[in-house]
Image: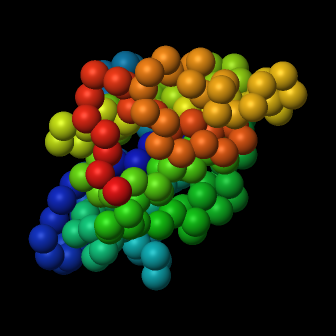
Amino acid sequence: MLQIRWESCKNQPSDLLARAQKYLMGLQQAAKRRKQSLTHTSHESPEGVEFKWNAEAKGAGRLLYDATTSRVLILERSGGKGSSIVTEAHRIFDSFRSYVGEIPWCILGFEVRLPDDFQLEKFKFLTGRATLHFKAKGIDLTAERWSLADAILKKHDIASWAKGLIGNGEVLAMEEGLVLRIPPKLPAARA
């Protein structure tokens, strides 16, 4: 599992290590309530604070301050007791980027770039299909990726397939495997 948690913070906190320790103590208390033991380590690094914990499962994380978004972030990768996650966790943490303005939403190779006023409202991942539903003031936007698009496109051109999929809604953009749509009952998105 990969988790990203954040807290808005106008100025860089003076002691990120103390924040990491507080987070790890919370994990330790939760484990104690479940009658489990949890051990942890943490240390400062150039990237922020690196930490690891072990209990019935194990985790590796990084706590950092991101000046671009004025947020304290906790990036955490966890897995089963026998899993090897540290190398993968550091690769993921090192690739993490924050954005202001146009924001790319990426999952499993599916990327959508939207203005920063769009908020992810819900998502659905099914075999062969990923759906992300966003909202902004007066706008509902759904982005879908169909991994079976190449098979569908052998029988239909993408415009007629998309129109059949969404009915009378407005199609904003189409590429192989990707359709952005607005339901017909809502106003069209701004350019």
Q: Is residue 46 above or below residue 53?
A: below
Residue 186 percent across, percent down from the top left = 26, 28
Residue 148 percent across, percent down from the top left = 77, 27
Evaluate whether residue 111 shows in this view.
yes
Front-most of residues 93 and 187? 187
Q: Is residue 144 above or below residue 69?
A: above
Front-most of residues 16 and 1? 1
Quadrant in which the C terminus appears? bottom left
Residue 170 percent across, percent down from the top left = 43, 33
Is 64 positioned to the left or the right of 8 in the image?
right
Quadrant in which the N terminus appears? top right
Is 86 positioned to the left or the right of 16 in the image?
right
Specify the color scheme. Answer: rainbow
Residue shown at the point (47%, 43%) measured from the top left: 172
Residue shown at the point (46%, 82%) measured from the top left: 46
- Quadrant in which residue 82 is drawn: top right
Residue shown at the point (56%, 25%) measured from the top left: 163
Front-most of residues 39 and 177? 177
Evaluate whether residue 51 shows in this view.
no
Q: Is residue 25 above or below residue 43?
A: above
